[in-house]
Amino acid sequence: MTATPPQVRINRDRLWAALMELKEIGAYDDEATGLRGVRRLALTEADAEARRRCVQWMTEAGLEVRVDRIGNVYATRPGRDRSLPCVLMGSHIDTVATGGAFDGTLGVLGGIEVMRTLNAAGIETLRDVEVGFFTEEEGVRFGTDMLGSAVTAGRIPLDHAHKLTDSDGRTVAEELQRIGFDGPEDERRPIPHAYIECHIEQGPILAEAGVSVGIVKGVQSISWQRLTLRGEAAHAGTTPIGSRHDAGLVAANVVVELRRMCDSGEFGQLRATVGTFDIGAGQTNVIPHHAMLTIDLRNPDDEAMTAAEQHLAGYVDSISAQHGVAVAWERMAKTAMVPFHPAIQDLLAQTAHDLGLGYVRAMSGAGHDAQEIAAICPTAMVFVRGENGGISHTPREYSTPDACADGADVLANAVLRLANQP
Ligand code: GLV
Ligand code: MN
Ligand code: MN
């Protein structure tokens, strides 16, 4: 590759200051780590306050802000030819309940920083440039991840998304209204020229390669299911072992079988997680009559994912029949492996090279809004290295100011190139 000098450098201190400011919204003391974490579940008060802060920053940067019917927010920096499709940057600002300061927010605040940088340099672009954030990426509150971007991409109907409920029975539609982010704009937004998302890696690959940025090849398949098991409550001391209908026992077997499936190598690079395991309040001397667990499967290979799901369904049928326990499955989310656009990946790689940044190409282990937006326009992602093995979804999540700034520099210069494409 020959190097073309980069056109802009973002303001590292300003980006870091924004990241540190936003992490105070929804901050909590995490007992397990002794650290300050971020708990900003979608459409809660904390999310609303963070949304308002981002909108304020967007407005201060002179951007035109609009909100759509699923609560996605977009801010536009007009280009010379407004009839051309825009270049879109974005990510999410909701977090899991044990979140850190970087997951999602880097792509949003990095995008706002790109806008500020273009303003400060007095740069005009041919196309509009937009930065946005999508509603309920994490899926922790309403049970479906990448919700706002999936609605925008047309994979999930708006009406279905609006009716999803949290554990207290409150709907997405009610909560959007309550926090004032039930916007008027069509959720099927105008198709962008390209979408680029800058995000922390949330894994160890970049650190192991000794680089601060990565070019993302694609996102692996994700399957989320809720499994409910119904057995029969009975006396712990008097019920013979062979006569029990123990829903807790079946649930425990499922957890162990999932781990065996991962270790066996029979299902490729399968990763399985039971993140919710509920057998109710329970009583010491009563056999559990009810169990509920969520099953998160990830696999970079769609066929191996299908084989894993089929094996799991068969296993659950047989173990529950053996114990006389009834089974109900609920599909929460499912996405196939999504490859990113080769030309956008190459443009990001060339941009990193021109900035003098080493990079690797890697698959994403986590889900991202980019995998949804990839259905409507050429899309790719820039990864930023995480410390501590790239640990994420915990307050231990950390990326250095330099790594964040390197990612935002790649974002800025790639967006500039795309925004000047005729
Ligand atoms: C989103 O963070 C995911 O679950 O991958
Ligand atoms: Mn994320
Ligand atoms: Mn996340």
Image (tube, grey):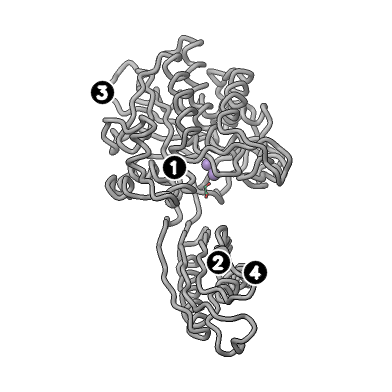
The x, y position of residue 330, in whole percent, is: 40, 64
The x, y position of residue 34, in whole percent, is: 73, 40
Q: What residue do we see at 55% from left, 73% from top?
A: 288
Mark on residue 83? Answer: 3
Disc 2 marks which amino acid? Ile
Q: Nearer the viewer, mark 4 or mark 3?
A: 4
Q: CA distance from mark 1 to mark 3?
A: 30 Å
Q: Is residue 258 visible?
A: yes
Q: Tell me the quarter of the picture where residue 248 sits.
A: bottom right
Neighbor class of circle 3 (other Cα within 10 Å; few <14, some 14-19, many 20+) is few
The x, y position of residue 133, in whole percent, is: 43, 33
Q: Which residue is mark 4?
A: 263
Q: Tell me the quarter of the picture where residue 235 sits.
A: bottom right
Viewer-nearest residue: 38 or 194: 38
Secondary structure under badge 4? helix
Q: Which residue is mark 2?
A: 279
Identify the mark nearer the N-term, 1 or 4.
1
Mark 3 vs 2: CB contact within 8 A: no
Secondary structure under badge 1? loop
